[in-house]
Image (tube, rainbow, N blue to C red):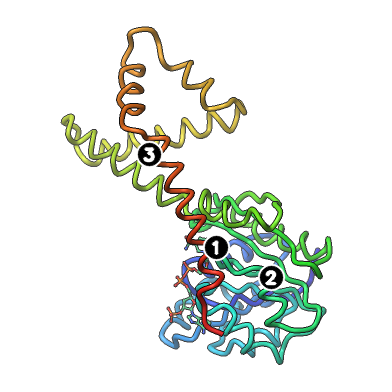
Amino acid sequence: MDSRKIAIIGGGNMGVALAKGIIQTKWANPSRIMIAEPLKEKIDQLKGIAEGVRVSHSNIEAAEFADVIVLSIKPQIMLRVVGEIKPALKDTKLLISVAAGITTTQMEEQAGGKLPVVRAMPNIAAVVKEAATAICPGRYASDQDVGMSRHIFESVGIVVEVEEYLMDAVTGLSGTGPMYVFQILEGLSDAGVKAGLSRHTANILAVQTLIGSSKLIQETKEHPAKLKDLVTSPGGTAISALHSLEKNGLKALLIDAVEVAAKRSGELGTNHKT
Ligand SMILES: NC(=O)c1ccc[n+]([C@@H]2O[C@H](COP(=O)([O-])OP(=O)(O)OC[C@H]3O[C@@H](n4cnc5c(N)ncnc54)[C@H](OP(=O)(O)O)[C@@H]3O)[C@@H](O)[C@H]2O)c1
């Protein structure tokens, strides 16, 4: 299997989820992973991820160590950090960014040379290995680089490849998506409580309903509208509830939310420190 060493710069939510995912695959030994994190207090916690995993508070040390560098830091500081590690970058190294908005061209220009760059947009379900990630290559990334990026993100869920102009749409839909689902689940749980269920029971029922319905779509590969028809019996409860959702514009609300998040993703690419 691939023997390249991997650095994860930024030991936050996404960086830790990726490190754990990669380590649990058969192809990456912990000693081939280094996490760079500026906060010294976090170092011990990061060392606890797995025996043998390397942790540093120096981004440049991590970049020198690795063949593949995953940048899991906020978009606003992404290009500044690429500039910081530039002395350690060679065209043989692969740079992967998970930041919203920052383009592969911006990364390539900041790194200089002909560095292979892959842009990825995972989501927080990476923590439980159920992320939906989209990836796209920059102009110098090879098929092997895309394959390596796939391996990394498949360790925390599923991966699709898209063209770069669609990455802001991905950020609006699946990158930001868990937040929509949390809001919907909170609403359903509140509704259950209002109808007299305990919070505990309402949560369990709401979450399992979402998991089960999603699995049904995933396994049958049916369009959601077709499954909606399956559950709306004439004069039944579901068609009455559907009428209420339509009156209140649930689908329009979701479309607006994804649209505004995608727009914000694009803005993040122009609003950063170098
Ligand atoms: N979380 C999500 O749902 C999600 C989904 C998709 C994509 N992403 C992307 O993933 C990236 C990271 O997000 P996150 O949620 O993991 O954020 P986070 O939890 O805040 O993690 C960022 C980490 O980077 C560290 N850091 C700050 N400045 C640094 C520097 N100069 N060099 C190295 N590390 C530095 C932070 O350390 P301190 O704590 O000490 O500041 C923190 O541990 C972002 O670009 C985001 O767009 C996140």
Circle 3: residue type: Val
Q: Quadrant of the C terminus?
A: bottom right
Marked residue nearer the N-terminal end (2 or 1): 2
In this image, 76 relative to 238: left or right?
Answer: right
In the image, what residue occupies the spot 58% across and 65% down? 18
The quadrant holding residue 154 is bottom right
Residue 145 in the image, given as x and y percentages of width and height: 78, 65
Please identify, in this view, whether the residue under mark 2 or under mark 1 is nearer the observer: 1
- The residue wearing badge 2 is 29
Front-lying residue, 146 or 162: 162
Front-lying residue, 74 or 219: 74
Q: Quadrant of the N terminus?
A: bottom right
Circle 1: residue type: Gly
SS under mark 2: loop
In this image, 75 relative to 22: left or right?
Answer: left
The circle drawn on residue 207 is 3
The quadrant holding residue 221 is top right
In this image, 16 relative to 245: left or right?
Answer: right
Marked residue nearer the N-terminal end (3 or 2): 2
Circle 2: residue type: Asn
The circle drawn on residue 266 is 1
In the image, what residue occupies the spot 59% across and 86% down? 59
The circle drawn on residue 49 is none
Vertical placement of residue 221 versus 204, above or below: above
Q: Residues within 10 Å of mark 2 (few under 14, many from 20)?
A: some
